[in-house]
Image (cartoon, coloured by chain):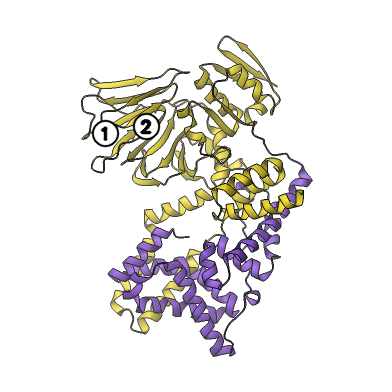
């Protein structure tokens, strides 16, 4: 019985890893893995391993191409005076930004699982730098702000839908905004469902990046007190330009998320963290592209779950969870124990009170909490 | 690995515009994998290199007809296989090589353990498990994982059924999974559970 289960698990796992799995099989696998936690864990490791590839030796294949090119010339297949073209290829392979970015993306996707788990660790490092809000025409600007504990939904003049999460601010020029001018500024977190308009891209300014889209649905999280800016793409295609690197464009595909950690200080900490890989270090910022986090293999995406009035987190550090809960419940949470801050939690809440939510989390992680009005203290 | 759209793009540029840069990119991207594949059949480094060069030469010579090819990536592998079989009959008076006779060694994953979720010990265990796979299983596993081919493409390439590939992959994943679990059972670290 158990052995049959296991064999079926390996079979379904191999199909999952190779993307040859059917939806019904995916559900079956999920159910089986609930009964076999050890195999569930080994699947996670295997998915990580699956995304890792032996380093490509580009120098070797480029050297081989040089030899091959000479052979083609000798056989008269390519005329001798096109040697420049060949040189051009090598240099275009070396320098072309698109090419490099693709490679970065590749290696980053490889590290998505690892990145997700560490990314969480950095969410709540307080940002001591002052954040410049994106410039907006001062007099005609329209501002929508939400307090902690409240969310709002609005439809802009062009039909673009915006869900604004707690403690956030969306500003735009109310007079100008329309089919011919589609620019907004964001502090905090919002989910955008942008009306398609190939002629006029929709642009979101945040303190450290600009996001340009044609028509798509995606989430932006850029709270000033959090170290990270996150852009999660659900469908469509978006183009991101970092403020400190205006010439470089990063393209996101559906189901990918871009994370920017905007402080040098975190770099050494990352180098020491065993769970980190494939972080791209660029001046003043760390950029990663990872995958969105799916909860329980169903359609719930952790990054956008707040839109559906759900507070979701999956294996996120307690301090990051606390940050989310603070905004969700409009409370202040103080974690008094350093080890507890790094403890990973998984949870999903809809109508629960903060007390109920914390009590539920106590089932998996040992901690105590005391609530005093809006302040919650968490101790070992 | 190039994405399907990138391969399509290169294919079009070579076919329509005689684009040598595109051809170079295609070569650089596919040469190592096609070389490994050829070597698994012919078991000679020099001949495998020659085979891959022949394949690319033919592609350049017949570039005008490239637009008609539906699955260019699979075409590259099938051309490599056919050319390798031609070499076999020319050099060794043999027509074909069976799947069980094919041999290859996968490049070990040896990334920096400092940057990994898994420990170097687990990586070694995984690499060993892969190295010990039976030949047929290993060839299929390599084409799936490292070359990124789909089951139906491999079925076409190796003249085997998708079902065979599926069961061979299950064997490979089971062996790797057991190698990982072996380590886990030792450490007994329960995974985080959902609420």
The chain coloured yellow carries which letter? A
Q: Earlier in the sequence, mark 1 or mark 2?
A: 1
Q: Nearer the viewer, mark 1 or mark 2?
A: 1
Mark drawn on residue B188: none
Q: Residue at x 67, y 44 (%)?
A: A32
Which residue bears the numbered disc 1?
Answer: A182
User: How many neighbours does mark 2 have within 10 angstroms: few (below 14), some (14-19), or many (20 or more)?
Assistant: many
- The residue under the point 49% across, 76% down is B80
User: Is A71 displayed left or right of B135 in the figure?
Assistant: left
- Tell which of B73 and A123 is nearer to you: B73
Rendered shade, chain B: purple
Q: Residue furthest right?
A: B186
| Subunit that carries the residue with mark 2 | A
Label of residue A206 in the image: 2
Tell me the element at label 2.
loop
Find the distance from the CA under tag 1 to the CA under tag 2: 15 Å
Q: In the picture, which quadrant includes the C terminus of chain A?
A: top right
Chain letter of the residue carrying label 1: A
Q: Position of residue A320 (x, y in %)?
A: 56, 29
Q: What residue is drawn where x is 51% and y is 21%?
A: A328
The answer to whether one can see residue B124 in this image is no
Determine the residue positioned at 29% across, 28% down: A156
Task: Give residue A263's position: percent from left, percent from top.
Answer: 47, 34
Using the rendered image, report if marks 1 and 2 lie on a common chain. Answer: yes
Instruction: Tell me: residue A241, above or below residue B16.
Output: above
- Marks 1/2 in contact by CB < 8 Å: the verdict is no
Query: What kind of element bears circle 1?
Result: loop
- Image x and y of residue A121, in percent: 57, 33
Rendering quarter of residue A325 = top right
Could you say where residue A309 lies in the image, as x and y percent from the top left? 48, 25
């Amino acid at each position: 019985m158990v052995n049959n289960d296991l064999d079926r698990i390996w079979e379904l796992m191999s199909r999952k890893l190779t993307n040859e799995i059917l939806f019904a099989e995916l559900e079956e696998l999920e159910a089986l893995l609930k009964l076999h936690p050890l195999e569930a864990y080994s699947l996670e490791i295997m998915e990580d391993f699956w995304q890792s590839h032996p380093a490509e030796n580009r120098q070797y294949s480029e050297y081989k191409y040089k030899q091959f090119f000479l052979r083609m010339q000798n056989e008269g297949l390519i005329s001798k005076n096109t040697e420049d073209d060949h040189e051009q290829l090598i240099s275009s392979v070396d320098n072309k930004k698109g090419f490099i970015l693709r490679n970065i993306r590749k290696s980053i996707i490889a590290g998505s699982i690892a990145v997700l788990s560490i990314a969480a660790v950095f969410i709540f490092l307080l940002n001591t730098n002052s954040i410049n809000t994106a410039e907006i025409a001062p007099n005609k600007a329209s501002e929508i702000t939400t307090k902690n504990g409240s969310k709002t939904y609005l439809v802009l003049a062009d039909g673009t839908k915006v869900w604004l999460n707690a403690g956030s601010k969306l500003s735009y020029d109310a007079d100008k905004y329309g089919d011919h001018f589609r620019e907004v500024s964001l502090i905090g977190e919002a989910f955008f469902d942008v009306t398609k308009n190939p002629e006029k891209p929709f642009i979101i300014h945040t303190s450290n990046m600009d996001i340009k889209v044609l028509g798509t649905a995606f989430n932006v999280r850029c709270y000033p007190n959090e170290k990270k800016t996150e852009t999660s793409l659900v469908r469509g295609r978006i183009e991101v330009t970092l403020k400190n690197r205006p010439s470089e464009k990063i393209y996101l595909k559906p189901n990918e998320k871009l994370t920017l950690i905007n402080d040098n200080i975190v770099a050494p900490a990352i180098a020491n963290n065993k769970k980190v890989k494939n972080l791209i270090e660029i001046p003043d910022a760390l950029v990663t592209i990872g995958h969105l986090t799916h909860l329980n293999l169903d359609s719930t995406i952790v990054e956008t779950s707040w839109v559906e009035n759900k507070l979701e987190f999956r294996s996120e550090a307690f301090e990051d969870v606390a940050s989310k809960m603070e905004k969700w419940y409009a409370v202040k949470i103080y974690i008094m124990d350093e080890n507890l801050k790094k403890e990973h939690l998984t949870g999903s809440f809809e109508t629960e009170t903060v007390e109920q939510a914390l009590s539920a989390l106590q089932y998996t992680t040992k901690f105590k909490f005391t609530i005093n009005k809006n302040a919650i203290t968490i101790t070992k | 690995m190039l994405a399907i759209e990138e391969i399509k793009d290169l294919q079009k540029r070579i076919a329509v515009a005689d684009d040598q840069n595109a051809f170079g990119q295609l070569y650089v991207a596919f040469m190592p994998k096609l070389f490994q594949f050829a070597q698994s059949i012919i078991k000679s480094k020099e001949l495998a290199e020659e085979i891959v060069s022949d394949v690319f030469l033919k592609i350049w010579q017949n570039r005008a007809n490239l637009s008609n090819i539906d699955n260019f990536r699979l075409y590259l592998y099938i051309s490599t296989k056919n050319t390798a079989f031609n070499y076999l009959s020319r050099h060794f008076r043999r027509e074909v090589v069976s799947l069980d006779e094919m041999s290859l060694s996968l490049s070990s994953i040896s990334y920096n353990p400092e940057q990994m979720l898994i420990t170097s010990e687990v990586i070694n265990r995984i690499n060993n498990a892969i190295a010990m796979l039976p030949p047929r299983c290993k060839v299929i596993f390599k084409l799936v994982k490292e070359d990124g081919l789909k089951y139906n493409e491999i079925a076409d390439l190796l003249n085997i059924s998708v079902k065979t590939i599926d069961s061979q992959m299950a064997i490979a994943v089971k062996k790797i999974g057991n190698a990982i679990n072996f380590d886990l059972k030792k450490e007994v670290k329960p995974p985080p559970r959902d609420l």
